[in-house]
Image (tube, grey):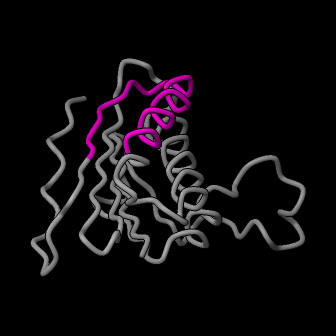
Amino acid sequence: MFLKALPEFEPREKDLIWQYQATIPANVKTIAPTMSRLMELAAETECFAGKELEIETALREALANAIVHGCKNDEQQTIQLSIACDEDCEIEMVVRNPGAGFDPSLIPDPTTHENLYENHGRGLYLINHLMDEVRYERGGTELHMQKR
């Protein structure tokens, strides 16, 4: 399935000082090299300074969810990633997959007693707690995250 280009980031009062975009195959083995390259590039800008762990963890989880759940591990599909940093080092990130989408409100809470020992289901919980703002668009196929 062909993905449309990611939308440009909304015009804002502050200028963007750094942007990164990538399209990666829907294979979990692509997460580590993608994240290594991204973190190296971001380190040159100071955009992630002091927020590296939160950003990297949330992005890894978002990419893994897009690959495993959105693309059903189909390596013929691709995931789109777009990141922007403004002059105040506020980060906006978008991860898009070509899947069917989902309703985030239907995802079980991993902190409830019956879910504590499950071996999955913590990705969205982590993303929501690590990011300052999280929203789902395009029926859950597009995850928008912000870190201030």
Q: Quadrant of the C terminus?
A: bottom left
Question: Residue drawn at (56%, 23%), measured in percent from left and top?
Answer: 29
Q: Residue furthest top?
A: 76
Question: Residue drawn at (14%, 69%), measured in percent from left and top?
Answer: 15
Is 113 left or right of 134, judged from the image as shown?
right
Residue 118 coordinates in the image, percent (x, y): 83, 52
Residue 24 coordinates in the image, percent (x, y): 36, 28
Q: Quadrant of the N terminus?
A: top left
User: Magenta stretch?
Assistant: 20-41
In terms of depth relative to the viewer, which is nearer, 148 or 107? 148
Q: To which quarter of the image does residue 68 belong?
A: top right
Is 77 left or right of 86, judged from the image as shown?
right
Residue 87 coordinates in the image, percent (x, y): 24, 70
Question: Residue drawn at (43%, 19%), measured in percent from left and top?
Answer: 75
In terms of depth relative to the viewer, which is nearer, 36 or 121? 36
Please say if 68 is above or below 134.
above
| Residue 6 on the magenta span | no
Question: Residue drawn at (54%, 66%), measured in percent from left and top?
Answer: 50
Question: Magenta region's main secondary structure?
Answer: helix
Please say if 140 is above or below 24.
below
In terms of depth relative to the viewer, which is nearer, 12 or 15? 15
Q: To which quarter of the image does residue 144 belong?
A: bottom left
Is 119 left or right of 52, judged from the image as shown?
right
